[in-house]
Image (cartoon, helix red, strand yellow):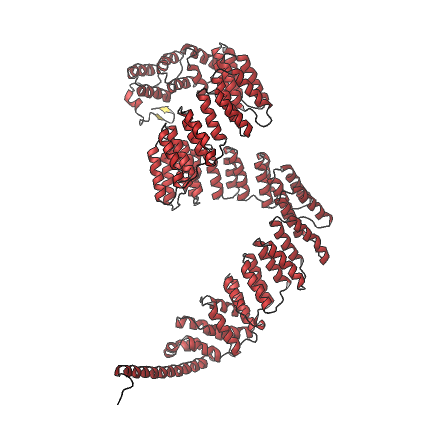
């Protein structure tokens, strides 16, 4: 007999049959056990002490599973809903697995039918936290509604699911539920849709709002005014004004009249988009619908006009507003005040502020902040401080933003003492400085190169548990680098890395710039390699710094090689790159190469700027190529890129060549020029030239004219005049200059005293002048310390040695610091044969302790002073 199947396959079929049979038998047994368990639990749930009874039944507990719980809920829909909810939550902790979606839906239906919608919503919130796919939930709801289990209306169930997603800001899921509804009877009620559309508008979910709107149209459900308004709002917030206007028109076509809120929403969108004329047209059309613009409408239009710098029109709207009996509030005034302040119309803004007081409108912090910020930008700091001080008296204490506005303004003007005062006031008033406060102060001190105070506030910031960001770290690093404190800069850099704050190209470039200024080019290039390895590619500014560093060291060839290689690194040479290289050529005497490079700028698509021109102009003046300099100058004037610095460079060039007539002619040209006016540098250059030529009357005339033009002479200007008077033998006039300096609060520092040791006069003459200054009370006794320091700094060590006895004869005490400076300077300069005699004189005059040794005075590490006293 033939076998239909091989023996092996028959075995497989037999096994499969056995497995199927056993599976069915097992399923049947499980079903029977589940039914028994459901029956027992149902019976127990009728008892008030059901939790104890269930917990005391280990067999029942073992039989618990999601299907059993679903069946219990299904069979007990008419039981006490609170008991069912308690049982459901109890079972969650017993089975340790996710419940069936149907269980959630059955219980939600029971709770809703018992008017416990809040508990039903919380339950459905638990359901969506299971992270089941929306498709599974939709399938369960559809099945639930078809079977007619529980809820009288499917729309309530869908609505609660949508609300649950909406409340958790799971907007994609909420809209997916809406999209899955295919029966208009199941579509959620208006309150649910309104809530969802409000959030979609609030969180800029334009595309999702469209889906809800399209679904409503698909189900032939007419959106109401609230839904239309929210859709228009979402479109406006996304800047899609053409669609917003289309929906607005469509709204009317479908018989839904826009409300005042709808108009305000669209007017606001048009204003933000800069479509102000359309916004005003829309406002006019409100009358056709019997609507009257309210305070919000006018405020929105005023804000739009203010931001568009149409301030006169904004003022007119403010006046119209009052005429129709709609009075502005603090928001209306604040919008206009902010607009005027940003335009620099400070007085107009202050008039509005006064108007607010008159009309009883209280200024809020935002208004005060706008006023303070505007006053600071106008350099009216006293008024700004007055406004801030008066805030507390008027019931609006200044916040951190008000203080920050003032501190930022003061920092920009380098008024650092006032900044400290404001910070103290801020703390005393209980306002804590924030990162922005400290960042502004640190930046301010870095700009004035006072890194001691910058360090102090940086530390205070960290001690206050405010972590500096990358910008603040970079500011500190840059400040120390510019000050020459490379060690401190790298220490801060290390701290930055330790806090996991990654440096950017600006941070690295600041360090590289500091190394270049110190002449440490090898370390600078090593740092470039390091930043590249760490994924921070150098930019054109980095290369400009490197090229400048090489040029300053006279490494012109290496600088040009680097310059030529920049393009290969995917970077574009800019005006600064060319200017740096041109300046390097000029300062190293390679004027022809500088001109050659200058001619190539245009060929490479870069427009030469005033920096390149000025660098070349300065090079021409330095090489006394005055005709070439004049041609460049005329070209700059023609292009409109000449500046006061340009004129000063050429005037200085003429002066150094002794062509004072030509230099004076350029000054007259500047005076007649409407756009470029001479500054204190211009006058000082010419005054110095006249003084060196002993033309003191002309120098004095310029000195007077300078002040008549509101330009205050600097210490350099006074020093030039003093030199001139010494050279021309007019000692009394020189004394008068010193008296004038003291009267104006100008310190007679080393710059002035340094001029006394120049070649024009002898050391004896210098002492006579110093004696006169002392007799007239113009200077203190530290004048002699400054003289010795000046001689040492200028390398005039023979004169410095001679000065010791002259000073001693006058019974004047030199400071210990000056003594050590002189000894160390002589030692460094190789005047070792003079040291013993100098030390003996110092001991004899009592300037240094007896038995002092040269070794101790020369040793930099020995501390000879304590609390200002010589040890």
Residue 147 higher or lower than 242, as above or below: below
Residue sitting at x 28%, y 19%: 851
> Farthest right residue?
323
Q: Residue 713 location in percent, x, y?
A: 53, 21
Residue sitting at x 34%, y 16%: 842
Q: Residue 700 location in percent, x, y?
A: 55, 15
Question: Residue 764 lies in what quarter of the image?
Answer: top left
Q: Residue 686 location in percent, x, y?
A: 52, 18
Residue sitting nearer the eye, 293 or 622: 622
> Farthest front residue?
603
**Quadrant in the picture for the C terminus:** top left
Q: Residue 826 location in percent, x, y?
A: 32, 18
Residue sitting nearer the eye, 361 or 564: 564
**Quadrant in the picture for the N terminus:** bottom left
Question: In this rendering, does residue 738 appear at all?
Answer: no
Question: In this rendering, does residue 54 appear at all?
Answer: yes
Residue sitting nearer the eye, 177 or 93: 177
Residue 502 higher or lower than 847, as above or below: below
Please give the count of numbered marks on the rendered protein.
Answer: 0
Question: Residue 674 lies in what quarter of the image?
Answer: top right
């Amino acid at each position: 007999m033939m076998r239909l199947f091989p023996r092996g396959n028959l075995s497989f079929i037999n096994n499969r049959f056995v497995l199927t049979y056993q599976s069915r038998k097992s399923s049947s047994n499980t079903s029977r056990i589940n039914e028994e368990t459901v029956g027992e639990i149902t019976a127990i749930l009728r008892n008030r002490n059901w939790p104890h009874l269930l917990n005391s039944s280990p067999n029942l507990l073992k039989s618990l599973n999601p299907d059993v719980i679903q069946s219990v809920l299904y069979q007990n829909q008419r039981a006490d809903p609170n008991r069912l909810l308690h049982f459901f939550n109890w079972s969650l902790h017993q089975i340790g697995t996710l419940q069936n979606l149907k269980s959630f839906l059955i219980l939600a239906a029971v709770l809703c039918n018992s008017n416990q919608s809040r508990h039903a919503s919380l339950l459905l919130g638990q359901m969506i936290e299971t992270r089941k796919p929306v498709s599974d939930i939709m399938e369960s709801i559809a099945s639930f509604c078809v079977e007619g289990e529980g809820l009288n209306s499917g729309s309530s169930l869908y609505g609660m699911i949508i609300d649950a997603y909406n409340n958790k800001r799971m907007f994609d899921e909420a809209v997916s539920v809406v999209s899955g509804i295919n029966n208009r009877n199941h579509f959620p009620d208006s309150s649910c849709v309104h809530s969802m559309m409000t959030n979609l508008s609030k969180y800029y979910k334009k595309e999702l709002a469209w889906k809800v709107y399209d679904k409503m149209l698909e189900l032939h459900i007419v959106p109401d005014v609230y839904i239309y308004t929210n859709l228009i709002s979402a479109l406006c917030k996304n800047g899609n004004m053409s669609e917003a206007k289309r929906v607005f028109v469509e709204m009317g076509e479908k018989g839904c009249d826009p409300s005042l809120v709808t108009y305000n929403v669209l007017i606001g969108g048009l204003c933000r988009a800069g479509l102000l004329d359309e916004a005003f047209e829309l406002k006019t059309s409100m009358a056709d619908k019997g609507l009257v613009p309210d305070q919000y409408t006018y405020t929105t239009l005023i804000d739009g006009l203010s931001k568009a710098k149409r301030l006169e029109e904004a003022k007119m709207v403010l006046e119209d507003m009052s005429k129709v009996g709609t009075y502005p509030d603090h928001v209306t005034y604040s919008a206009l005040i902010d607009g005027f302040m940003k335009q620099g119309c400070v007085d107009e803004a202050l008039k509005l502020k006064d108007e607010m007081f008159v009309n009883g409108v209280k200024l809020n912090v935002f208004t005060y902040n706008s006023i303070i910020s505007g006053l600071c930008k106008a350099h009216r700091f006293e008024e700004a401080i007055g406004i801030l001080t008066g805030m507390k008296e008027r019931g609006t204490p200044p916040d951190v933003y008000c203080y920050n506005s003032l501190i930022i303004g003061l920092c920009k003007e380098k008024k650092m003492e006032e900044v400290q005062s404001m910070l103290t006031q801020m703390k005393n008033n209980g306002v804590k400085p924030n990162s922005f406060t400290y960042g502004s102060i640190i930046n301010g001190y870095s700009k004035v190169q006072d890194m001691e105070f910058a360090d102090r506030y940086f530390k205070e910031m960290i001690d206050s548990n405010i972590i500096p960001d990358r910008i603040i770290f970079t500011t500190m690093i840059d400040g120390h680098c510019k000050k020459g404190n490379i060690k401190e800069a790298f220490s801060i850099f290390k701290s930055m890395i330790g806090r996991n704050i990654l440096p950017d190209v600006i941070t690295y470039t600041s360090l590289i710039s500091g190394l270049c200024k110190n002449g440490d080019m090898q370390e600078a290039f090593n740092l470039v390699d390091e930043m590249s390895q760490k994924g921070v590619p150098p930019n054109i500014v980095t290369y400009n710094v490197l090229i400048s560093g090489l040029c300053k060291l006279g490494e012109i060839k290496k600088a040009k090689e680097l310059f030529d290689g920049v393009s290969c690194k995917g970077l574009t040479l800019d005006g600064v790159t060319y200017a740096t290289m041109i300046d390097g050529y000029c300062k190293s005497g390679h004027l022809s190469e500088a001109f050659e490079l200058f001619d190539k700028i245009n060929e490479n698509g870069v427009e030469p700027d005033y920096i390149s021109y000025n660098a070349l102009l300065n090079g021409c003046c330095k090489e006394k190529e005055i005709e070439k300099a004049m041609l460049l100058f005329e070209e700059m004037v023609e292009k409109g890129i000449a500046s006061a610095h340009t004129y000063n460079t050429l005037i200085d060039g003429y002066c150094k060549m002794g062509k004072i007539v030509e230099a004076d002619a350029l000054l007259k040209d500047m005076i007649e020029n409407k756009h470029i006016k001479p500054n204190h540098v211009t006058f000082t250059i010419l005054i110095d030239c006249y003084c060196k030529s002993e033309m003191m009357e002309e120098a004095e005339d310029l000195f007077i004219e300078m002040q008549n033009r509101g330009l205050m002479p600097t210490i350099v200007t006074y020093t030039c005049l003093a030199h001139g008077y010494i050279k021309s033998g007019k000692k009394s006039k020189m004394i008068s200059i010193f008296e004038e300096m003291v009267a104006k609060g100008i310190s007679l520092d080393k710059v002035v005293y340094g001029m006394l040791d120049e070649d024009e006069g002898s050391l004896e003459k210098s002492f006579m002048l110093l004696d006169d200054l002392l007799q007239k009370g113009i200077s203190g006794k530290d004048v002699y310390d400054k003289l010795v320091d000046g001689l040492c700094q200028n390398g005039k060590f023979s004169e410095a040695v001679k000065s010791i006895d002259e000073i001693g004869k006058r019974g004047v005490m030199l400071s210990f610091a000056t003594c050590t400076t002189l000894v160390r300077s002589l030692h460094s300069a190789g005047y070792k044969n003079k040291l013993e005699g100098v030390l003996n004189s110092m001991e004899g005059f009592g300037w240094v302790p007896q038995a002092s040794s040269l070794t101790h005075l020369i040793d930099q590490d020995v501390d000879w002073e304590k609390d200002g006293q010589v040890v």
